[in-house]
Amino acid sequence: MPIDLTMPLQFHGILRTIGWMDVLDILVVAAILYKVYEMLADTRAITLVKGILVLLGVTLICSALNLHAISWLLQKAVTLLFVALPIVFQPELRRGLEHLGQGRFWGSNSVLNDEEAHSVVHELAKAVKQLSHDKTGALLVIERDMGLNDISATGIRIDGLITADFLLNVFIPNTPLHDGAAVIRGKRLIAAGCLLPLTEKHFSTELGTRHRAAIGLSEQCDALIVVVSEETGTISVAENGRIMRHLDIDTLKAILQPAFVQPQTNIKDLVRNWRDRRK
């Protein structure tokens, strides 16, 4: 059987046409795709992406097998799907545009050094511990990469340096700011009494309006939301549409630290350790 030497020659010819600009172009596209994947990872959107890829794969297989009826139906479904993508991925698209507009697509929103971050986390934990002991309900929203100016605009602007005593005064019961959320940016409290969107998912009846509001906001942005239950004093943290409950102060500090500086510990490991202790 004669050996076909045309394929290696064609491959060599293709390689000779690739220049440095082509390599740079490919690397830039790869970096953008990786950043998009990084933004979608550990969110509900990643399961939708997998579903879309499966649908595209099935469409290609049916076309290759000349299954005309099924191919036609799948092609129409893919067309409708791409029309619906801006609606399905609205939170993720909004987050990406926010990052791009704020110049944060590649970088982090952290502007605190280690000493400042440690001080802020200490003050937050001290305030949450006291609020939990007194069974005073509270919502603390820690802004990360995505700006929360639209949320802070629903409350009262404050822009004060964070201390435990300051936060305790904000959440004094039966005051105008008590029932709303406090928004934290870096080492400053920028607003209080803010309104948060409620989640549409169904949860246990143990979770009240504060918990539903915390989960609702975490579904729409990358903020970290701390909740103190008014009924039980339980400390919870909502992130990416999920909520971790019955946290102790040490675990809370470990979760909060990466929100202010570059994380030294993987947040997934912290969540896994917390779950192991709950078992």
Image (cartoon, grey):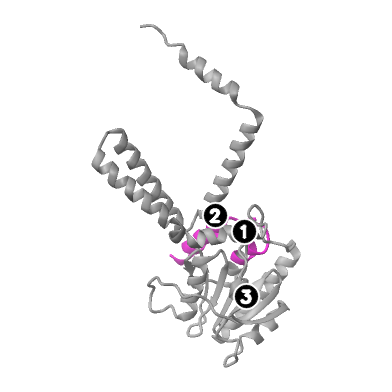
Instruction: Mark 3 and mark 1 in contact? Answer it, CB < 8 Å.
Output: no
Q: Which residue is mark 3?
A: 183
Which region of the structure is painted magenta?
Answer: 255-279
Q: At numbered mark 1, what does the secondary structure look like: helix, strand or loop?
A: helix
Q: CA distance from mark 3 to mark 2?
A: 22 Å
- At a point 59% along the width and 43% down the height, the residue shown is 31
Q: Residues within 10 Å of mark 3 (few under 14, many from 20)?
A: many
Q: CA distance from mark 3 to mark 1?
A: 18 Å
Instruction: Mark 1 and mark 2 in contact? Answer it, CB < 8 Å.
Output: yes
Q: Which residue is mark 1?
A: 99
Question: In this rendering, is residue 8 above or below 248?
Answer: above
Tell me: 1 left or right of 240. left
Residue 123 is a magenta residue = no
Q: In terms of sequence position, does the residue under pointer 1 or pointer 2 come before the other?
A: 2
Residue type, label 1: His
Q: Can you tell which quarter of the image residue 151 is in?
A: bottom right
Give percent across and percent down for residue 47: 41, 54
Residue type, label 2: Met
What secondary structure predominates along the stretch shown in magenta? Answer: helix
Give percent across and percent down for residue 247: 53, 71
Q: Nearer the viewer, residue 240 or 198?
A: 198
Residue 256 is a magenta residue = yes
Give percent across and percent down for residue 89: 47, 59
Q: Which residue is mark 2?
A: 39
Q: At numbered mark 3, what does the secondary structure look like: helix, strand or loop?
A: strand
Q: Nearer the viewer, residue 205 or 83?
A: 83
